């Protein structure tokens, strides 16, 4: 498993905490930045992560901004991305198990570091359940195909 992370300036500190968690767990990752508090545009970073996740099978993405909302909107514009804004471990487990989500979005102004770490761990540790959920994920793919 490999994780690709990015944030905007409003999610910098939380992203750094999540990088530390990945290092603790020995998870391979690429941190796409930014690496300073200088103002940046979240769509640029969300798109970089989305493209990387789609390009490399089995890769997961993590995006952090102030609320997580903007990042999730942009990431979900990319075909093949199923980004989920999560505020609880339960949501993270369910979006992986039922939706086969491949990008986790978090809001630094919404969740604290401890909660965010738990959410990321739940996201990483939960596999797609398949079964009846596979046909639903296929319907998401079908919708994407109709839009392009």
Image: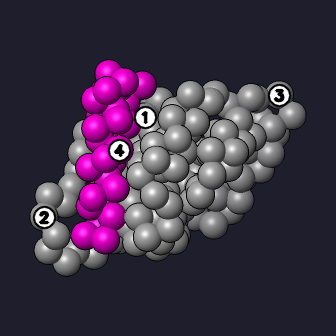
Question: Magenta segment: does it hold 135?
Answer: no
Whole-percent x and y of residue 24?
31, 26
Furthest residue in direction top, as rendered: 26
Do labels 3 and 4 touch, CB within 8 Å?
no
Residue drawn at x 86%, y 34% is 132
- The residue that label 4 is drawn on is 18
Of callouts 3 and 4, the N-terminal one: 4
Residue drawn at x 77%, y 35% is 134
> Circle 3 sits in a helix, a strand or a loop, which is it?
loop
Do labels 3 and 2 touch, CB within 8 Å?
no
Of callouts 1 and 4, the N-terminal one: 4
- The residue that label 1 is drawn on is 59
Q: Residue 131 carries which label?
A: 3
Region in magenta? 1-29
Q: Nearer the viewer, mark 1 or mark 4?
A: 4
> Circle 2 sits in a helix, a strand or a loop, which is it?
loop
Disc 2 from disc 4: Cα separation: 16 Å
Residue drawn at x 66%, y 39% is 93
* Image: 75 above or below 133: below
Do labels 2 and 1 touch, CB within 8 Å?
no
Disc 3 from disc 4: Cα separation: 31 Å
Residue drawn at x 35%, y 44% is 18
Q: Residue 36 carries which label?
A: 2
Q: In this rendered view, identify the residue nearer to me: 53 or 96.
A: 96
């Amino acid at each position: 498993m490999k994780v690709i992370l990015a944030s905007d300036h409003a999610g910098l500190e939380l992203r750094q905490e999540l990088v530390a968690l990945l290092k603790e767990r020995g998870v391979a990752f690429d941190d796409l930045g930014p690496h300073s508090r200088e103002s940046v545009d979240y769509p640029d970073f969300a798109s970089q992560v989305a493209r990387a996740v789609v390009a490399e099978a089995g890769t997961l993405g993590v995006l952090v901004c102030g609320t997580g909302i903007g990042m999730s909107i942009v990431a979900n514009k990319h075909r093949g991305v199923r980004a989920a804004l999560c505020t609880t471990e339960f949501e993270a487990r369910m979006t992986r198990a039922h939706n086969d989500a491949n990008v986790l979005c978090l809001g630094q102004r919404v969740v604290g570091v401890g909660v965010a770490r738990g959410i990321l761990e739940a996201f990483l540790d939960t596999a797609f359940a398949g079964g009846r959920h596979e046909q639903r994920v296929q319907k998401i793919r079908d919708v994407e195909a109709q839009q392009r």
